[in-house]
Amino acid sequence: MNKAMTIFYEVHDNLYVNLTNKCPCSCTFCLRQNRDHMEKSDPLWLEHEPSYEEAVNELEKFDMDKYREVVFCGFGEPTEAFDVLKKLAAYIKEKFNKPIRINTNGLGNLINKRDITPELEGVVDTVSISLNTPNAEEYNKIVRPVFGEKSFDAMLDFAKKAAKYVPNVVLTTVDTTITKEEENECRSICEKIGVKYRIRAWEA
């Protein structure tokens, strides 16, 4: 496994932020199983988790005018580094006025042992949560969360609460991985809790 200190990397016209390699899930489809980087990045396995100060210093190397959006994602669950995330997101928004998105498994409240959603207000513009399937039993099989059976409901609860503080909350599934009937079930779930539903393309 190659390691580096790749805190930021480019995907299309967005700047992605890689703050941690920790994750409470072991998804059967996770890209980390067969690669150590993304298309234009150096290795995303970190030598250590960067501090806020390290991230700000590294950010100075980038021309922020190039990017449409800043996305907290990387090779880990971003809410595992929530204290650094929210401070860095606030800095980027204040200094560069860029939209902020978090790509997450939606288990941030379980990870941090508190409701973190109020802390997203005014800092995060979009929360994109991996729903994967409308069925809790199937979810546990493919996501394999350390929190066990309570994870699916906790993820949906996180989405519902986040919608009170974040303008755009989206639950996603991957096309070709579930049936059209299951997609309709996912759409109904999203409508019920008041968030958007998006079917995204599969990335090999």
Image (cartoon, rainbow, N blue to C red):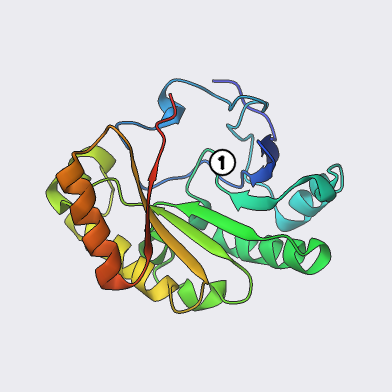
Whole-percent x and y of residue 152? 24, 57
Query: Residue 29: which quarter of the image?
Result: top left
Name the kind of residue labelled 1 in the image.
Gly
The answer to whether 194 appears left or right of 180 in the picture is right
Whole-percent x and y of residue 171? 37, 56
The answer to whether 61 appears left or right of 2 in the picture is right
Whole-percent x and y of residue 135? 15, 51
Say whether residue 7 is visible. no
Q: Which sits in the foreground, 116 or 96?
A: 96
The residue drawn where x is 60% and y is 21% is 2
The residue drawn where x is 13% and y is 48% is 137
Please state the total of marks drawn on the protein image: 1
Query: Residue 48: which quarter of the image?
Result: top right
Which residue position is annotated with label 1?
Answer: 74
The answer to whether 186 appears left or right of 31 in the picture is left
Whole-percent x and y of residue 41? 67, 28
- Quadrant of the rendering where the N terminus is positioned: top right
| Tag 1 secondary structure | loop
Q: Dot 1 surroundings within 10 Å: few (below 14), some, or many (20 or more)?
A: many
Say whether residue 89 is visible. yes
Does 108 sit above or below residue 21? Answer: below
- Quadrant of the rendering where the C terminus is positioned: top left
Does 24 sit above or below residue 194? Answer: above
